[in-house]
Image (cartoon, rainbow, N blue to C red):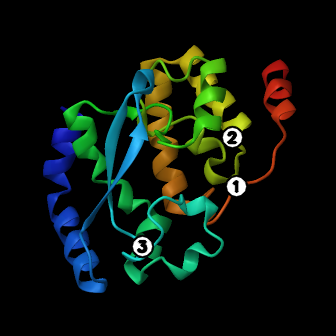
Amino acid sequence: MLSLGALIFLAPLLLSVAAWVKADSPGPILFRQKRIGQHKKFFNILKFRTMRTDTPATVPTHQLANPQAFITRSGAFLRRSSLDELPQLFNILKGDMSLVGPRPALYNQDDLVAERDRWKANEVPMGLTGWAQINGRDKLSIPVKAFLDGEYVRRRNFALDLRILGLTFLNVFRSSGIIEGGTSTIKRGDADNSRKN
């Protein structure tokens, strides 16, 4: 219900962004990518296209040597503002995702999926935003991100979801935690140590 209401309310914005993406560079408006959802089931996530059509299809953005070379002019703003994620409201409406939960892993992110298994973070619906997103986002290493996803699973409740949604809007406004082309290097032990603290 919330995703449907958001789609109706944001329809003028969605149409404006779609027109901008189409006018800015050749190619489709939407980008589809295989992701891993709840119980490790695959689904196609939707985003506004932010990169050129000649971007290597099988290489995640964070593994590209120079991702900025492939990001379009409109894409740079959409990624910085997180507006490229808005089409995922259709994924939520369909039932592939939830508003809040661990972010869906890429289809080939076996390391993240394995780490999430340690914390039972693959057992809940994946989200448009999540606990890891408001606590570092791209700055986090895989083990720490998975640990935070597991912490969300352990603490999961309606009040926490509302807090995460509120802090997400604040972080988007500040463009916090966004790094193109990689994540920080935090060792596996840091996640175990953070659990003890």
Going by the numbered disc 2, the residue's amino acid type is Ile
| Amino acid at circle 3 | Met
The quadrant the N terminus occupies is top left
Mark 3 = which residue? Answer: 51
Q: Determine whether, in the image, residue 14 is placed left or right of residue 105.
A: left
Residue 37 image point, x, y percent: 40, 31
In-image side of 52 versus 32 (left or right)? right
Q: Are marks 1 and 2 in contact (CB under 8 Å)?
A: yes
Q: Amino acid at mark 1?
A: Thr
Q: Residue at x 81, y 44 (%)?
A: 186
Mark 1: few/some/many CA within 10 Å (<14, 14-19, 20+): some
The residue lying at 68 percent from left, 28 percent from top is: 147
Q: Would you name the residue on which mark 2 appears? A: 142
Q: Is residue 91 left or right of residue 11?
A: right
Q: Nearer the viewer, residue 134 or 190?
A: 190
Q: How many marks?
A: 3
Q: Earlier in the sequence, mark 3 or mark 2?
A: 3
The residue tagged 1 is: 183
Q: CA distance from mark 1 to mark 2?
A: 9 Å
Residue 124, percent across and down? 44, 21
Choose the circle earlier in sequence order: 1 or 2. 2
Helix, strand or loop for disc 3? loop
**Could you give the CA–CA distance between mark 1 and mark 3, rounded to whole angstroms?**
19 Å
Q: Looking at the image, which is closer to me, 166 or 156? A: 156
**Quadrant where the image shows the C terminus:** top right
